[in-house]
Amino acid sequence: MGKTVGIIGGMGPAATCDLMEKIIALTRAGCDQEHLHLIADVDTDIPDRTAAILHGGEDPVPELRKSARRLEAAGAELLLMPCNTAHYFYDSVAEAVSVPVLHMPRLTAQALRRAGVKTAGVLATDGTVQSGVYEKALAEAGIKAVYPAADLQREVMRLIYDGVKGRAVPLESIPVPDVLADLRAQGAEKFVLACTELPIAFAQLGLMERCLDPTRVLALAAIKAAGAESAVSGPW
Amino acid sequence: MGKTVGIIGGMGPAATCDLMEKIIALTRAGCDQEHLHLIADVDTDIPDRTAAILHGGEDPVPELRKSARRLEAAGAELLLMPCNTAHYFYDSVAEAVSVPVLHMPRLTAQALRRAGVKTAGVLATDGTVQSGVYEKALAEAGIKAVYPAADLQREVMRLIYDGVKGRAVPLESIPVPDVLADLRAQGAEKFVLACTELPIAFAQLGLMERCLDPTRVLALAAIKAAGAESAVSGPW
């Protein structure tokens, strides 16, 4: 049933499951055998991406490449990387294998352009924000990126690291509505949940309105690229 | 971080994600790198297990063995098989690899024995019921298995195949409380959700009371066997 899809995962582990669930839920299938063959490598040996980009932390590229090659050797014909920040290292990963690697930020930017969005609010890790991963992808699609003010960006990081990854603080304790209000005041028509932990948090908080979920965009693109039929008709 | 855990999955795809989520949620971890390395093979080329056991359908053993070897070659040091019915073929799978394969029905029976259960109601596919996979594991632990009456067993099959796998009928339309009442009338102290699709359905239906979830038992056993620390103290 279609191409075998490999997932370079573990960034974080819950985000890998979130992508898998979205691929499964969005595939038109009436029995197990009509679903795509997925191989997910929840490789928790991959070092923290933001720490590497901003604070001289351990380079994640060697382990990202290992995971990509492991998946290719296991039979994957198409790779996905459910971590927006990891796309800073996209070229180094893609050149390690002979199978295509879908690019989540570029696919997201294309989806926004198709929807006529001119200004998008980007919620992401400091690594993604400061490295310009989304800024570049959005600019290529003619879309302006706006970001939370510094104090609110710290709250986004707390939501990602302490809320979802660390499970150390309740999601509700973080002033997410203030972050969204700040982005709207800067002209954002849509909020891009540009860290794969964020759709998990936002779904739990009931805050998906006006949000674009790049994990869902990636899931739909993977279903199409693998040759399966999607259960929905729109671009997201 | 501990041993790499391989998952022979795709039976069904949603049940594979359910096991992964339970392993992740039940591991004591404060960041990505403290989680176990998992490799999940959502191998939807594995033929239907019940069809093979009861109706002369295609033999799933060759593909189950392929998946097990694929995972071992990718680095898995311990294998899990999140499909109760597939445990009918356990010996053929386990002998194909040199790494241990955890046995979900036996682990479940041991958990029931530790809890002092004498009679357990088994909710499962026709393949699991008629092949005696659970009957044998429970008997070894000194526990009596009771099953739904024939007409109610048909409703359990509808819940698994049309409700969860096929997403063709609403879960609420299936008279699950009648199934549970029948099992209680036969003396069942606990209900074993002995098909990996059932914990998904029962959680959605809010019917987990008195239920034992073998997927959760397997997740906890895997965390222990892989050398990680569990976030809970009990056997399930």
Image (cartoon, coloured by chain):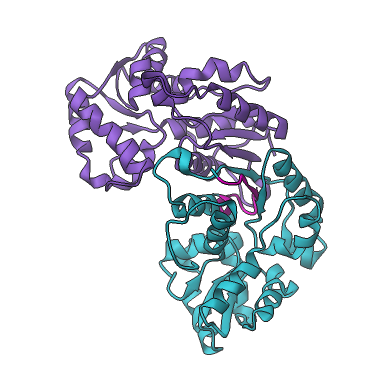
Chain colours: A cyan, B purple
Give the side of residue B193 with respect to residue A145, left or right: left
Q: How many marks?
A: 0
Q: What residue is shown at x 54% (from left), y 54% (from top)?
A: A223
**Quadrant holding the C terminus of chain B:** top left
Q: What residue is shown at x 71% (from left), y 76% (from top)?
A: A136
Q: Nearer the viewer, residue A110 or B37?
A: A110
Task: Look at the image and give the residue range highlighted in magenta.
Answer: A2-16
> Is A14 inside the magenta-drawn segment?
yes
**Residue A232 vertical placement versus A34 (above, below):** below
**Residue A5 vertical placement versus B214 (above, below):** below
Q: Position of residue B235 (x, y in %)?
A: 46, 29
Q: Nearer the viewer, residue B169 or A210?
A: B169
Give the side of residue A85 with respect to residue A59, left or right: left
Q: What residue is shown at x 54% (from left), y 40% (from top)?
A: B23
**Residue B139 vertical placement versus B53 (above, below):** above
**Quadrant holding the N terminus of chain B:** top right
Q: Nearer the viewer, residue A132 or A38?
A: A38
Q: Position of residue B101 (x, y in %)?
A: 58, 23
**Residue B179 vertical placement versus B94 (above, below):** below
Q: Position of residue B78 (x, y in %)?
A: 63, 28
> Is B90 inside the magenta-drawn segment?
no
Give the side of residue B64 with respect to residue A58, left or right: left
Q: Position of residue B139 (x, y in %)?
A: 37, 11
Q: Is residue A136 visible?
A: yes
Q: What residue is shown at x 72% (from left), y 30% (from top)?
A: B73
Q: Is residue B77 visible?
A: no
